Amino acid sequence: MLAGRCVGSVAETANRFIRQRCPHLLKFLPKNFGFGLGLDFRESSLIMNAKNQRKFAQNMVFNLAIGFHDLELTDMQKADAQGSIRKLSKYSMLIADTVLIQSGDEPPDIVTKHSVEWKDVSYFINEKNDKDIMPPQGKHYTPEQVESQSAIMSSRLRERSKACAPDRSSLARNEKQAELMQQKLSVKRSEKSSAWSQQGQLSSRADILEVDVYQSAGEYPRDLPSSEVYVDMQGQVLFAPINGSQVPFHISMIKNAVQPDPDRTAT
């Protein structure tokens, strides 16, 4: 993966290497060996297969993925395996890393700075008890290898816990936001009810002052008839005879009025 070379040369080189070293594994190789990283996570124009004739350029970033698909497990391999692996007939493996293309003939930069030794990248899981790491039958590991495998497993468990931590923090944040929203709504409701109460008190006082046309019966019109409906235009009051007495009603309390006989002043 050098600047100026074809992207498809990676697939050609890999096929040639496997054909020379392990020809029986050639049919298990994938068709592409990774892809370029750009505006999209997987750039369709930078797929690393044998047909791609685009050129590598400086500062390009690729996800290099090499592996085998549908490898067959032999009976001997199943006998040395543990747990549910013995029930498998096929398996696959994939190794991937991020690669940064350098200038000229300078080799690409492997972004992940970590040991690739088998003891550092492999571990075994005992399905009955994850704390007890047992090697396959017929194989023995040194205490250093077992300690390394335990450290890797602990690291994996920590990564899983960290992966679950954002979900828990997000849930707690959402609950806190909902609680704050309820508090704000309660404050708004109380403020609104208080405003309505004050407004109602003010309007009721204004209504009382507005309809308070006469301070006493002595201020009624002097020409007020005793047994007829009378309208005081100046005070906007209607007098209606009820049980022999004139009772005043402000016009704001009257919904409508009907005058069926035009010869009479009012009914």
Image (tube, rainbow, N blue to C red):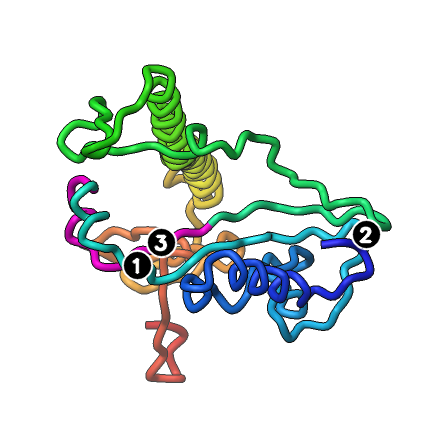
Tell me, yes or no, if residue 205 can be seen here. no
Q: Is residue 10 found left or right of 221 in the rendered image?
A: right
Whichever of labels 2 and 1 marks the residue nearer the N terminus, that label is: 2
Residue 156 pos. (x, y %): 38, 30
Crowd tier of the residue under label 3, counting other residues whose Cα lies within 10 Å: few below 14, some 14–19, many 20 or above:
some
Q: Position of residue 154 (x, y in %)?
A: 35, 23
Callout 3: helix, strand or loop? strand
Magenta segment range? 81-94
Q: Which mark is residue 78?
A: none
The residue that mark 2 highlights is 58
Q: Is residue 42 left or right of residue 168?
A: right
The numbered mark, 3 or 2, whose residue comes first in the sequence reads 2
The foreground one among 207 and 156 is 156
Specify which label sits upstream in the sequence, 1 or 3. 1
Residue 15 showing in the rendered view = yes
Local secondary structure at mark 1: strand
Using a 10 Å C-alpha cutoff, classify the residue at mark 2 as few (fewer than 14 neighbours), some (14 to 19) or many (20 or more).
some
Q: Are marks 1 and 3 in contact (CB under 8 Å)?
A: yes
Spot the residue most to the right: 104
Could you tell me residue 216's position as x and y percent? 39, 37
Residue behind mark 3: 249
The amino acid sitting under disc 1 is Ala
Is 21 colored magenta in this rendering? no
Q: Quadrant of the N terminus?
A: bottom right
